[in-house]
Amino acid sequence: MEVPIVDPDAPLEDDLDTLIVIGGGTLIDRAKVAAKDRNRPLRLVAVPSVWGSGAEASPIVVLDRGGAKEIRVDRKYLPEHRVIWPELASSISPDQAKTGCGDCWAHALEGFLSPLAEATLRADLAGLMHQMLDLPLTNDARWFEMSARACAGQARSSVGLMHGIAHTLEGPLRATVPDRRWGHAAIIATVFLPVLDFDQRTSTRCGELVREFDLGIAAIAAVGRSLFDRETYDRLRPAIGEYWPRILRDPCTRTNCALVRPAHVDHFLSWACP
């Protein structure tokens, strides 16, 4: 028996054998839990309605638990089938499409730079980023595949400070001011360039890896400038200062390519887009 998912928090019938989910990363992750954390796991078919999270191609689940992020990693959460519906690309607003591209870029770059990444994975993600540089940061169905590959890649290593900031801040900010700009992808897109600048200034490893795999740091920084929104960052800046201790403790921050220390908050509080 096959049915589309309507309410991922509703009890599922015992005689189901397949669960189909169409949505963004939050909904897909909730469907993973609904399908796999049961005595008789269901076959899961994931259809992303927006790119960025890549949840449809990842064994990682990120859940919102009272404003805090709970991250689970288990191969059982990897959907059995991933379906790309290209026509959905035109249904995404330009802003959502752009921030989704930012999330995709963050997965690829932070997975590539992660100290946990091995050479083969770095080569794969470098090749992916070369392809991504040829795509516009807008509504383009090719981003569905880029997103899936980026997320699957970073799942083999880790991410870094961009995600540490987003995972820490999105809950408190959206609880205070319900606003799309405080969603995960929007925060990632906004801090992409400040974090890239921090990594370059703080560690030589970032530049060394980019040169080793023939990636132009200037081209990646140009992506960051296209993603950057000054007004959003100015509104985000005080929260970075307030929640910096929690950002430091986030598991993603701990695998950043450059070591992040308490005093480094000054970089983000004083940072100005070049």
Image (cartoon, grey):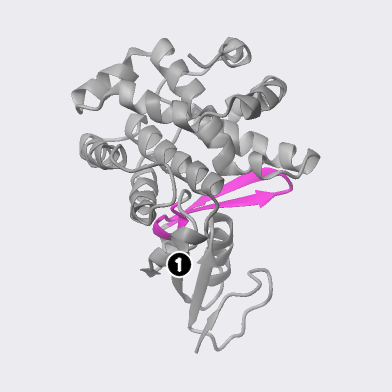
Measuring from the top left, give residue 271's x and y in whole percent.
56, 13
Segment tinted magenta in the rendering: 54-74
The answer to whether one can see residue 36 in this image is no
Q: Secondary structure at mark 1?
A: strand
Mark 1 surroundings: few (<14), some (14-19) or many (≥20) residues within 10 A: many
- The structure residue drawn at horizontal position 46% and vertical position 39%, both measured from the top left corner, is 102
Measuring from the top left, give residue 261's x and y in whole percent.
55, 15
Measuring from the top left, give residue 171's x and y in whole percent.
70, 41
Does 202 sit left or right of 188 as displayed? left
Identify which residue, 206 or 115, lies in the foreground. Answer: 206
- The structure residue drawn at horizontal position 52% and vertical position 68%, both measured from the top left corner, is 22
Identify which residue, 198 or 119, lies in the foreground. Answer: 198
- The structure residue drawn at horizontal position 39% and vertical position 15%, both measured from the top left corner, is 200
Reply yes or no: does residue 28 show up in magenta: no
Above/below status of 121 relative to 45:
above
> Image quarter for residue 111?
top left
The answer to whether one can see residue 30 in this image is yes
- The structure residue drawn at horizontal position 47% and vertical position 59%, both measured from the top left corner, is 90
Residue, far right? 176
Q: Tell how many labels.
A: 1
Does 127 sit left or right of 21 as displayed? left
Above/below status of 65 relative to 27:
above
Above/below status of 128 relative to 164:
below
- Residue wearing tag 1: 47
Reply yes or no: does residue 57 show up in magenta: yes
Measuring from the top left, give residue 119's x and y in whole percent.
21, 34
The disc labelled 1 sits on which kind of residue?
A: Val
Does 117 sit left or right of 46 as displayed? left
